[in-house]
Image: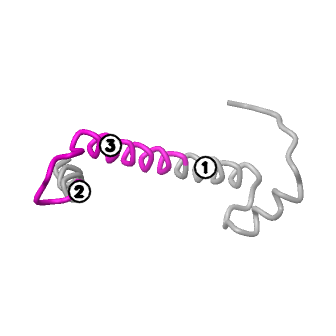
Amino acid sequence: MRTNIVLNDDLLHEAMQYTSARTKRAVIEEALRTFVSVKAAERRRRTYQERVRALQGQLAGTVLRTSSRDILRQDRQRR
């Protein structure tokens, strides 16, 4: 998709110092890939934390031989 945007030149120059990309387009594409990767990891962590809380709620008052986290680890390894 072709888009025209006004970029902060100082910020773009600084970003280019942290990457091997030498064009503005390459820097922006790398930044977008990094952004998507970070947000996807945050979503996975949030989903995992929600599953832990749900499981802990279901198991409240139940005495287990193994912890709920160990059970979730085993479940994750089976997937």
Q: Which residue is mark 2?
A: 73
Depth-wise, is mark 3 or mark 2 nearer the camera?
Answer: 3
Q: Which residue is mark 1?
A: 35
In magenta, the rendered stretch is: 39-68
Q: Amino acid at mark 1?
A: Phe
Residue at the location (45% across, 46% down)?
46
Q: Is residue 65 magenta?
A: yes
Q: Earlier in the sequence, mark 1 or mark 2?
A: 1
Q: Is residue 51 above or below residue 16?
A: above
Residue at the location (26% across, 57% down)?
69
Taking the image as shown, residue 46 lies to the left or right of residue 59, namely: right
The percent coordinates of residue 16 (x first, y second) are 76, 63
Taking the image as shown, residue 70 lies to the left or right of residue 5, namely: left
> Mark 3 falls on what kind of element?
helix
The percent coordinates of residue 61 (x first, y second) are 20, 46
The percent coordinates of residue 66 (x first, y second) are 14, 60
* Callouts 1 and 2 close, C-beta under 8 Å: no
Crowd class of label 1 (few under 14; some 14 to 19; many from 20; radius 10 Å):
few
Q: Which residue is mark 3?
A: 51
Residue at the location (42% across, 47% down)?
44
Residue at the location (43% across, 50% down)?
45
Q: In the depicted view, which residue is nearer to us: 37 or 78?
A: 78
> Mark 2 falls on what kind of element?
helix
* Callouts 3 and 2 close, C-beta under 8 Å: no
